[in-house]
């Protein structure tokens, strides 16, 4: 099995836990996040998007990122080119309409919701492994409640460098 095929299989297997064919109910995902004291991480992407594919292949498959997502987040991916119906706080419609509804119709975009189904942070565009690892820690620790991401990121990497010495 090729490396890309293996990664695609892993991603599909991970997603099967939460996604039923044809409907992505983010209200249910948010309830799961609330019950398990985690955030909901929604990855918006589209087929034939080089940056989206790179994020899936490299960033989401990173040795630090993948276990953190699995342990600390309820994860859902939404391919805006698929015909899935998305349910979110009274909205029911296509994946593309959902992305526009919440104001993130740029791909890839990583959106993080709290247990109340409110967006707490969004990262539009391709994120490399290091930046995304910092984003995950920013959201997981709820640092967004008290500090902006750029300040957090600087302090986060300074602490990690000190701990590595």
Image (cartoon, helix red, strand yellow):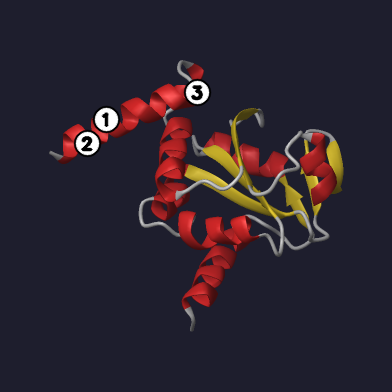
Which residue is painted at 18% across and 32% down in the image?
Answer: 162
**Toward the viewer: 38 or 11?**
11
Tag in front: 1 or 3: 1
CA distance separating discs 1 and 3: 18 Å
* Camera sees residue 142: no
Secondary structure beneath disc 1? Answer: helix
Q: Residue furthest front?
A: 50
Which residue is painted at 55% across and 60% down in the image?
Answer: 54
Secondary structure beneath disc 2? Answer: helix
Residue 161: which numbered mark, if any? 2
The location of residue 147, given as percent across then percent down, is 45, 18
Which residue is painted at 71% across and 39% down in the image?
Answer: 27
Marked residue nearer the N-terminal end (3 or 2)? 3
CA distance separating discs 3 and 2: 22 Å
Q: Is residue 44 above or below residue 12?
A: above
Residues marked 1 and 2 touching at CB (< 8 Å): yes
Q: Is residue 110 left or right of residue 145?
A: right
* Camera sees residue 68: yes
The location of residue 109, given as percent across then percent down, is 64, 44
The residue under label 3 is 144
Classify the position of the C terminus by image quarter. top left
The residue under label 1 is 158
Q: Is residue 87 above or below residue 119?
A: below
> Mark 3 Cα within 10 Å, few/some/many (few <14, many 20+)?
some
Which residue is painted at 47% across and 48% down in the image?
Answer: 128
The location of residue 15, given as percent across then percent down, is 60, 59
Q: Is residue 68 above or below residue 102?
A: below
CA distance separating discs 1 and 2: 5 Å
């Amino acid at each position: 099995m090729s490396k890309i095929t293996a990664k695609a299989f892993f991603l599909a297997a991970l997603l099967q836990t939460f996604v039923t064919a044809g409907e992505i109910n983010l209200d249910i995902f948010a309830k799961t996040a609330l019950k398990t004291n985690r955030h909901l991480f929604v990855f918006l992407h589209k087929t034939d998007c080089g940056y989206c594919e790179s994020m899936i292949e490299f960033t989401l498959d990173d040795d630090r990122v993948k276990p953190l997502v699995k342990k600390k987040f309820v994860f859902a991916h939404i391919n805006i080119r698929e015909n899935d119906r998305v349910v979110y706080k009274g909205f029911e419609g296509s994946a593309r309409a959902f992305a526009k509804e919440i104001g993130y119709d740029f791909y890839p975009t990583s959106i993080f919701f709290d247990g109340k189904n409110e967006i707490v942070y969004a990262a539009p565009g391709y994120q490399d492994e290091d930046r995304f690892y910092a984003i995950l820690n920013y959201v997981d620790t709820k640092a967004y409640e008290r500090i902006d991401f750029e300040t957090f990121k600087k302090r986060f990497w300074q602490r990690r460098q000190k701990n590595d010495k």
